[in-house]
Amino acid sequence: MSMPAVPTVSESRTLAEAVLDKARELGVTVSVSIADASGHELLTVRGDGAAWFTPGVARAKAQTAAAMKKDTSALADLDVRFPGLLPLIADQLSFQPTVLPGGVIDSAAQPLWAVGVSGALPEQDEECARAALTAASVTEPGGR
């Protein structure tokens, strides 16, 4: 199956399953959200046993990564380096951005898309999110 730049619903489900499979492998429960380049939600799934609030956090991570065109872990020191900038950015968005790790972009895709994961430790959220990027790259002949 060849992946278009923006995953379809079916492909988004495949990406979400890759995330949930990685979470099971790590022994954690998470929620996952896939967003397009504009930060619009394509799919959000609350994994079995994941806390009630994790879908919203995963959505915010995916939306932030898409809007900022960077992984959320790369934005972690933004508020420290530039105090007051994040609230100014938030005022211009239709969602509350976050710098919590676990939001990653597929920078190889044009337009890019993003995945957000929440429910485990920050480094585990990010590892699970990267499983979606791996799943996306193997669906194209020869990878990305």
Image: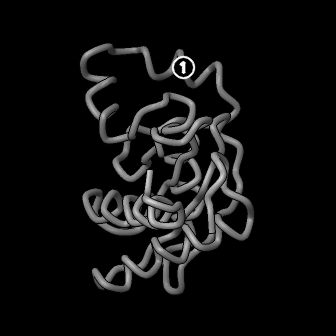
Residue type highlighted by circle 1: Ile
In depth, the one of 79 and 135 nearer the eye is 135
Q: Residue at image x 71%, y 55%?
A: 42
Q: Quadrant of residue 11?
A: bottom right
In depth, the one of 13 and 120 nearer the eye is 13
- Is 21 placed left or right of 42 in the picture? left
Whether 102 is drawn above or below 86: the answer is: below
Give the farthest residue toward the right: 9
Give the farthest residue toward the front: 142
- Is 41 placed left or right of 143 in the picture? right
Q: Residue at image x 49%, y 47%?
A: 61
Q: Position of residue 57 (x, y in %)?
A: 52, 54
Q: Position of residue 132 (x, y in %)?
A: 46, 63
- Is 95 placed left or right of 49 in the picture? right
Q: Check disc 1: other Cα within 10 Å, few if <14, some if 14-19, many if 20+.
A: few
Q: Position of residue 73 (x, y in %)?
A: 31, 41
In depth, the one of 74 and 92 nearer the eye is 74
Whether 15 is drawn above or below 77: the answer is: below
Q: Residue at image x 45%, y 71%?
A: 19
Quadrant in which the N terminus is drawn: bottom right
Whether 123 is drawn above or below 19: the answer is: above
Kindly identify which residue carries mark 1.
89
